[in-house]
Image (tube, rainbow, N blue to C red):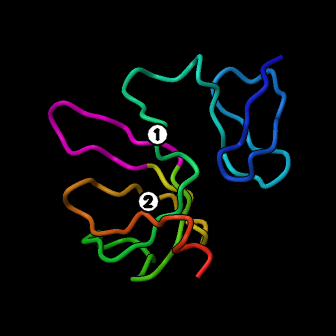
Amino acid sequence: MTEIICPKCNKVNSDNDFITTKCFNCGHRIFSQESLPENWDMTLSGKRIQLIHTNDPYTELKEGDLGTIEYVMKHETIEDQISIQWDNGSNLMMLVGIDEYIILDEVDQIA
């Protein structure tokens, strides 16, 4: 049994899942640190993100939409990707250096 703290609500979750599970309190997808791929950076996990602009022609996301960062997938030969659970249900990743977004501070979230 593994105990994982949800970065969104800070509640402790226990599960037998090897890589990923959903927080029993808030539903945020959380990951076991011991089983993460080497190129996943969890530093921003749980932080809120706001979309400014994306060139993706198929997304329904629009300027101002909000989401919660899950992880950043680091790459050596292409742009890094930010995995996000968008509040509207979308799972579109942001491309670092291509898409435009703001990572919100705790102060921004309160205002």
Residue 5 coordinates in the image, percent (x, y): 73, 36
Q: Residue at x 50, y 55 (%)?
A: 84
In the rendered view, would you say 45 is above or below 54? above
In the rendered view, would you say 59 is above or below 20? below
- Of labels 2 and 1, earlier in sequence is 1
Write down the quadrant of residue 110 in the picture.
bottom right
Query: Is label 2 in contact with label 1 (beta carbons under 8 Å)?
Result: no
Tell me how far mark 2 sits from mark 1, CA to CA. 19 Å
Quadrant including the N terminus: top right
Q: Which residue is drawn at 47% across and 66% down?
A: 104
Residue 81 coordinates in the image, percent (x, y): 33, 47
Identity of the amino acid at label 2?
A: Leu
Write down the quadrant of residue 92 in the picture.
bottom left
Which residue bears the numbered disc 1?
A: 43
Identity of the amino acid at label 1?
A: Thr
Which residue bears the numbered disc 2?
A: 92
Q: Is residue 4 left or right of residue 48?
A: right
In the rendered view, would you say 13 is above or below 57? above
Residue 80 lies in the magenta stretch: yes
- Give the magenta-colored segment's residue range: 70-82
In the rendered view, would you say 75 is above or below 48? above
Residue 17 coordinates in the image, percent (x, y): 74, 24
Pointer 1 local density, CA inside 10 Å: few below 14, some 14–19, many at least 20: few
Q: Residue at x 53, y 56 (%)?
A: 47
Q: Is residue 14 left or right of residue 100?
A: right
Residue 103 coordinates in the image, percent (x, y): 42, 63
Write down the quadrant of residue 26 in the picture.
bottom right
Task: Decide which of 88, 31 is in the foreground and name it.
Answer: 31
Which residue occupies the extreme front position in the image?
107
Task: Decide which of 22, 60 is in the foreground and name it.
Answer: 22
